[in-house]
Image (tube, rainbow, N blue to C red):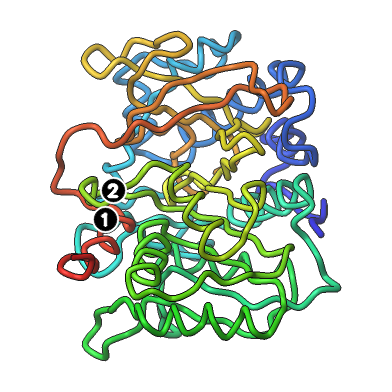
């Protein structure tokens, strides 16, 4: 499905970025890609220093020189930005006329990250998703599917990143019908359509087509929980149905259940096997797709690297230690977001039972409390008063 007919803005300056992002196998020869990855990070760092006055000044203030990135640990020297920085600042490395897509991270409330993409950046991220879906054999152009999107019903002018992503995911199998669970209220807000979602479950089960369910896990859980409380008998979805969640439970830890418990509930109420229940991790500030393997771990693909930083000193931590999640990738040419520290607590691990030979990380929740609210937080606020 993906195509290689995609070119960086300047092939002479970004030749290694092109080569790395052209790699079609998400997880093959991960360690062997280190040298190419480092070349790409040198190129993209210099690119942003040349194109963004802000980033040039930031690099100068830290005495950073792109050519000094020679070992993987040298990536830690690359001036980073915090994900929440983009909630109050619009920093571009391209002329405004070259902005191909503008997405925001927040939903109905909270500050919004303003992320701008040139065509290379968003298309590059999209074909990464293509290649991961190919890896897991989730692309089926011959089989029509019904879709339940646990995301925002959008107007034509919407820039919400989560809604954009969920609708994008509908391309991997032909659409029979789409049901979006967060309905527009007419006053700029959204409301979770609990009973409409349950009715869609029943209707799609009766139709017998595979069902694909994408979006926020909080709403998926709430629909299943309400269905069970109301005494609805379990349904049996088509065996090729697929759940692919994303967005996390930010802001509603009191409602969150363990991932395995959610998967058990989905299997019980909808008959979907565990291997067809997956979660994804990513953000509008960092669009590299991190997708659960068969063991439900978030593997790092060849296009990125992950570090864990101490919450007090920001020093790098080793395997199994908890700290800030730090993403590094050269794919983005539109903004200096090639080294981003998230507000998530995580730990890095290796040797997954699934057999993929790449590191994986575990998410351990958000670090502290902030006024900045993510898209998932804004959405989960809609649940207040509804889950009792």
What is the secondary structure assignment of the residue under circle 1?
Answer: helix
In this view, the residue farthest toward the right is 142
Residue 177 x %, y %: 62, 85
Residue 73: which disc? none
Residue 191 higher or lower than 266, as above or below: below
Q: Which badge, 1 or 2, is on the more N-terminal residue? A: 2
What is the secondary structure assignment of the residue under circle 2?
Answer: loop
Residue 231 higher or lower than 241, as above or below: below
Residue 106 higher or lower than 371, as above or below: below
Q: Please name the residue shown 24% across and 79% down the image.
A: 189
What residue would you read off at disc 1?
377
Asked if the residue at tag 2 contacts the one at tag 1, i.e. Cβ–Cβ closer than 8 Å, the answer is: yes
Quarter holding the N terminus is bottom right
Quarter holding the C terminus is bottom left
Closer-to-camera residue (200/369): 200
Residue 234 x %, y %: 52, 69
Closer-to-camera residue (97/308): 308
What residue would you read off at disc 2?
250
Q: Is residue 19 left or right of residue 190?
A: right
Residue 140 x %, y %: 81, 65
Q: Residues within 10 Å of mark 1 (few under 14, many from 20)?
A: many
CA separation in Å, label 1 and label 2: 5 Å
Q: Is residue 241 left or right of residue 286?
A: right
Q: Is residue 273 left or right of residue 1?
A: left
Q: Is there any visible trace of residue 75 in the rendered image?
A: yes
In this view, the residue farthest toward the bottom is 186
Closer-to-camera residue (219/27): 219
| Quadrant in the rendering for residue 67 | top right
Q: Is there any visible trace of residue 100 in the rendered image?
A: no
Residue 3 higher or lower than 151, as above or below: above
């Amino acid at each position: 499905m993906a195509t290689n007919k995609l070119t960086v803005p300047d092939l002479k300056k970004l030749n290694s970025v092109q080569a790395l992002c052209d790699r079609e196998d998400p997880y093959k020869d991960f360690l062997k890609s280190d040298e190419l990855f480092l070349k790409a990070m040198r190129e993209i760092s210099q690119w942003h220093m040349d194109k963004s006055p802000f980033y040039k000044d930031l690099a100068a203030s830290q005495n950073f020189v792109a050519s000094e990135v020679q070992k993987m640990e040298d990536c830690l020297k690359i001036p980073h930005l915090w994900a929440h920085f983009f909630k109050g600042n619009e920093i571009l490395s391209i002329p405004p006329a070259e902005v191909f897509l503008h997405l925001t991270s927040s939903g109905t409330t909270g500050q919004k990250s303003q992320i701008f993409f040139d065509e290379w950046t968003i298309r590059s991220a999209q074909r990464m998703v293509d290649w991961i879906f190919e890896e897991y054999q989730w692309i089926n152009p011959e089989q029509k599917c019904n879709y339940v999107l646990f995301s925002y019903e959008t107007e034509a002018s919407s820039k919400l990143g989560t809604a954009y992503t969920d609708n994008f995911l509908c391309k991997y199998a032909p659409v029979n019908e789409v049901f979006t669970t967060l309905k527009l209220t007419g006053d700029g807000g959204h409301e979770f359509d609990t009973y409409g979602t349950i009715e869609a479950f029943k209707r799609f089960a009766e139709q017998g087509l595979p069902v694909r369910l994408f979006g926020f896990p909080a709403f998926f859980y709430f629909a299943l929980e309400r269905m069970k409380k109301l005494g609805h008998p379990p349904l049996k979805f088509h065996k090729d149905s697929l759940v692919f969640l994303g967005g996390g439970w930010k802001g509603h830890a009191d409602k969150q259940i363990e991932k395995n418990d959610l998967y058990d509930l989905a299997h019980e109420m909808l008959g979907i096997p565990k291997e067809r229940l997956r979660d994804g991790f990513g953000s509008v500030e960092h669009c590299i797709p991190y997708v659960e393997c068969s063991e439900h771990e978030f593997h790092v693909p060849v296009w990125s690297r992950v570090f864990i930083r101490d919450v007090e000193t920001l020093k790098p931590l080793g395997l199994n230690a908890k700290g800030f999640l730090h993403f590094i990738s050269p794919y983005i040419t539109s903004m200096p977001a090639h080294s981003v520290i998230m507000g998530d607590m995580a730990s890095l691990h290796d040797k997954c039972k699934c057999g993929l030979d790449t590191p994986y990380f575990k998410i351990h929740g958000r670090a502290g409390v902030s006024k900045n609210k993510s898209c998932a937080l804004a959405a989960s606020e809609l649940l207040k008063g509804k889950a009792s």
